[in-house]
Amino acid sequence: MPRLRTLAIVAPVVIVHLALPLIFAYAVWRSAASGIANWLPAVYLALTFGAFIYLAGAWSWFGHAVRLLLAGVTVGAAVAGARRSVASPLMSLDVIDLIVRGGVGTMFLIATVSAVRGRRVRGPALDLAFPLRGGTFVIGQGGSTTAVNYHADHPSQAWALDILKLNAAGIRANGLYPAELARYAIYEAEVVGPCDGVIASVEDGVPDRPPPECDEGRPAGNCLAIETETATVFLAHLKSGSILVQVGEQVRVGQSLARVGNSGNTTEPHLHVHAEAGKYAGQMMAGPGVPLRFGGRFLVRNDRITPSHETSADSAASPLKSVSAASGAEAESAETISNADHARDAEDLRQE
């Protein structure tokens, strides 16, 4: 059963990120021989899918270089195909092909627009220091739409982030989806205080499980809540026995709090971060979600961050060094969502 579940996770990722871009690029080149009328639907589908997967794909699996390479292959096939289609005699138009590729391409165009919109939010936001240090990290889930953040439709977690770490090869793990926790770059990474506040809740003792095992009964796993003047910040999926603080303790920005683990309802090691408006209500997911910025940046999927060693009590001044090619809405603020449907099933903490 674990092998089947692993295959069910890995196969779609490989197909969507590697196989489909190459298949669509080849289709663009091949259709060009039938004339421009048959080439246009193929290039439309290839470009809309390519734009969507570039923005919304899980590129921590394969690295930024592969992301750029496949984008280059798609654009190159489109350019070469354009020249070939103009020089080729026009054959009969395949109407079914036009309808199918046009329809699917339009779906990906809409999804691409949603991914772009996910990089921008409006309204007030909670400015935090980055909660990890010691390396380069990447956002696995983050943004204001479900195209880039599957938490986005949950009232309490609408602005949540799932954070991964990159190894020396620029990917999140040694292997596609290893069962050994130590092969994930973020496992046991140091979690530090993202803000000044008081520890309002601590949950520990939930065992770390090897992927793809997860604990659906305790979705947050080992976690803690930090109460500030305006919001409560939650850090989840911590390593069992690693939490260094207690309820009632005053904590500061940059203070060592715990280590990243793989506890709770999670498909692999990562740090889940989200904030809810107001004081701690006695449980997670009891209040409306609050948009987050780190060092003034609104982070979205595939953004990469190399944090400095934050020690200042002024979280808004905590510096971040960006290594992302597209940082996404740095100067935009964020909007607080409505206080509704807070009792949604806690399994939304699970990383996609």
Image (cartoon, rainbow, N blue to C red):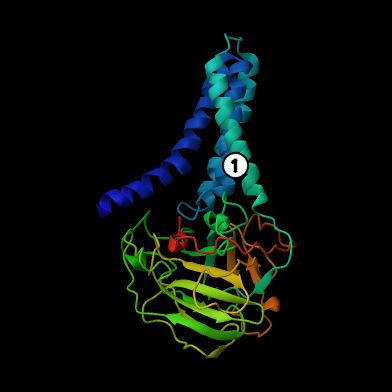
**Residue 302 locus on image (x, y percent):** 56, 56
**Residue 322 locus on image (x, y percent):** 64, 64
User: Which quadrant of the view contains residue 109?
Assistant: top right
**Residue tagged by mark 1?**
111
Image height of 152 relative to 19, above or below: below
- The one of 23 and 206 positioned closer to us in this rendering: 206
User: Which quadrant of the view contains residue 240?
Assistant: bottom left
Residue at 59 percent across and 26 percent down: it is: 102
Circle 1: element type:
helix
Indicate left or right for 308 with 330 as reference.
Answer: left
Q: Can you name the residue that lies furthest to the left here?
A: 1
- The one of 342 and 109 positioned closer to us in this rendering: 342
- The one of 232 and 88 positioned closer to us in this rendering: 232
Disc 1 marks which amino acid? Ala
Residue at 65 percent across and 84 percent down: it is: 312
The C terminus, quarter of image: bottom left
Residue 47 seen anywhere in this rendered image of the structure: no
Image height of 16 relative to 351, above or below: above
Residue at 45 percent across and 59 percent down: it is: 351
**Residue 113 locus on image (x, y percent):** 65, 43
Residue 339 seen anywhere in this rendered image of the structure: yes
- The one of 66 and 232 positioned closer to us in this rendering: 232
